[in-house]
Amino acid sequence: MSTKNQSSNEEDLQQSFPICDNQFVNFKYHWTTKVLMRQLNDNESMIIHVSPKFATVHGQVAFQWSLQMRGTTFLNDVIDVNEGISQDEAECEPNYIALSLYFNDGPAPIIDDLQAITKLLQDKRRSTDSNDDDYVDNIGQVISLSITLKLPLQLFEPNTYLNTLTPTPITSFLTANYRARASSKVFNRLSRKNKLLSNMEDNLRRRLSLKQQEDFDEIFNRIMNEEEECCAKSCSGIKFKKCDEARLQARSIYKTVLFKKLLIACCDGCQKRAKILEEENVGGEMDQEENEEVLDDENAFECSEQNKDVVHEMLANMFFTKVALPEMGYVENFADFLFDSEVHNLPVLKRVCEGYLCSELNTKKDLITSLLLELLYLAIVFNLRLLKSMTLSELSTRPEELDEPDALLALDEYKNLDRRMLRLSGSNLTEVIEEVQHFREQRLRIKLVEMN
């Protein structure tokens, strides 16, 4: 993403590019660097500089950026022209230096509605619009650049990325006296597949007709009743304790098998995909483990037909709200759910779970630091972009609590949290705190410019 150079003086800039208004937020970043060449060969040198990362934060949402200055200088271009280079090549400008803006991380995979203005600061009072010639003229010199980013305010609204179909229950697991349990299935299991989603698609505000919702409710209730009857039959004649264990085991597969049944029953695209898999397995004897391996393949049940996205979202919200959420009282329950969703490659369940957690963060205030650190860790492990943005934005405002990680690790609460992180992926609490500290440095490098 290259910056846009605009030729205008400071007064024109104030009129055509307001510092802050109701629809946009402006940020300013200053970068001082020395334009140096690195020799590649006898005839060519290369210029490349990368700025420190900086973060644009407004409210609970953040985006991370960096600048890159790159260019190539042909030292013997005149000699080359005289030695027979074509006229078209001779007319090309041999020297160039360009400044580009790179989007590194944030809740949105792509940002289109962005304006950027760069200026070359000559002294404290004067600045000029920067261009490629200015960079070439300053080779070997230290220059100061000022970049102003104009971003839509809507990008910093969490509701822009949340699925509005997911309700927030009156009773929340995010309470002031939160304490996570130290035992969890997820810490003792290894996934044969660990495919993190590289991007989180924006949830479109689409609605199903009332008739479609009623049909899905009917199918959902039918499948749930069938599962209850099946579970009751399997428990008949068995001791109560064993029956209770069987029910617990059945609940664990709700996260995957039951949701796949819902997809097949309600989405003809998923039904076709499941039928193809079934036909491929006809004639070949496969044990249960091998069969599960096939079902876990990428996009095995969640079809990729674009017009079916709204159906998947509706079913995911229904399943999450009615089946999964009532049994979730601790962060570790959400870790289990995210783990199962990823192992069985059901990204729509990951999105709805992230949407719920972010909606909770958006409505609950003064959450304890240990909870935010654990949510940040889950966001990093499962690549939950919005959750990562919101937790980093909040934790970066608490430097006094995170300045001494060793002191925190002396507390049982953080000691147990560190132990759970080590069991999950081999990382530790200190690394997560360092991530917050690095983000805070990025945040302090940029200035949010308010309107006078």
Image: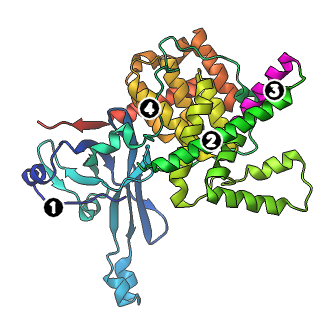
The residue drawn where x is 61% and y is 19% is 417
Q: Which residue is mark 3?
A: 246
Do we see residue 94 in this rendering? yes
Q: Is residue 267 left or right of residue 95?
A: right
Q: Which residue is mark 1?
A: 7
Which is in the foreground here, disc 2 or disc 3? 2
Local secondary structure at mark 2: helix
Which is in the foreground here, disc 2 or disc 4? 2
Q: Label 2, label 1: how many angstroms apart (C-alpha)?
A: 61 Å
Do we see residue 200 in this rendering? no
Above-or-below relation of 315 to 322: below
Q: From which residue to which does the magenta span run?
A: 239-254
Q: Are marks 4 and 1 in contact (CB under 8 Å)?
A: no
Along the viewing direction, whichever of 322 and 101 lies nearer the viewer: 322
Sort mark 1 into few (<14), some (14-19) or many (20+) by Cα contacts within 10 Å.
few
Q: Label 2, label 4: how many angstroms apart (C-alpha)?
A: 25 Å
